[in-house]
Image (cartoon, rainbow, N blue to C red):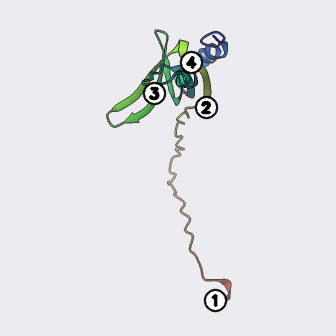
Amino acid sequence: MGGEYPPRRVLETLARLTQEHFIEVQWDDACEMRDVSIDDIEENYKTTITVSGWFYGLRDSYLILINEKSYYGYRVLAIPIGTITKIRILTRRPKKKVLRILKREGAIPVKVVHIYVKSKEASQVNF
């Protein structure tokens, strides 16, 4: 067998995660093989899965990850923490900025529009 499960660096990363984090998780999944030779067992017994999504939280020794949103709801993965081999923080969710509106008495709102027109080549332009 290898080292400890989950590795110490996984536990340290889990302690830092918030729901703002988009992460990549790698874990060892169960594997079923049928009609295989002894050599096939040695070569293919390990199934490493890698998936990315928004960190939702930790519940009962599971990492909850939201990796898809559709019209019908969310696609959620519950990964046993003991099977996780690596977690990589990819980004944080951008925070929504408060729109600031400048209000002055008697001020008229102005919208500036730039219109770019493709002109003829310089040799064809008549002044």
In the rendered image of this protein, does residue 61 appear above or below residue 106? Answer: above
Rounded to the nearest whole Å, what is the CA distance between mark 2 and mark 1?
Answer: 53 Å
| Residue 109 percent across, percent down from the top left | 50, 54
Label 4 Cα neighbours within 10 Å, binned few <14 / some 14-19 / many ≥20 = many
Rounded to the nearest whole Å, what is the CA distance between mark 4 and mark 1?
Answer: 68 Å
Image quarter in which the N terminus is found: top right
Q: Of marks 3 and 2, which one's residue comes earlier in the chain?
A: 3
Q: Which residue: 54% across, 40% down?
A: 100
Q: Of marks 1 and 3, which one's residue comes earlier in the chain?
A: 3
Residue type at mark 3: give it: Ile
Q: Of marks 4 and 1, which one's residue comes earlier in the chain?
A: 4
| Residue 95 percent across, percent down from the top left | 55, 33
Q: Which residue is mark 1?
A: 124
Q: Which residue is mark 4?
A: 84
Image quarter in which the C terminus is found: bottom right
Front position in the image: 113 or 83: 83
Residue type at mark 4: give it: Ile
Q: Which residue is mark 2?
A: 90
Q: Of marks 4 and 3, which one's residue comes earlier in the chain?
A: 3
Rounded to the nearest whole Å, what is the CA distance between mark 3 and mark 2?
Answer: 14 Å
Single out the mark in the foreground, 4 or 1. 4
In the rendered image of this protein, does residue 63 appear above or below residue 4? Answer: below
Residue type at mark 2: give it: Leu
Front position in the image: 77 or 117: 77
Front position in the image: 5 or 17: 5
Single out the mark in the foreground, 4 or 3. 4
Looking at the rendered structure, the secondary structure element under dot 4 is: strand
Single out the mark in the foreground, 2 or 4. 4
Single out the mark in the foreground, 2 or 1. 2
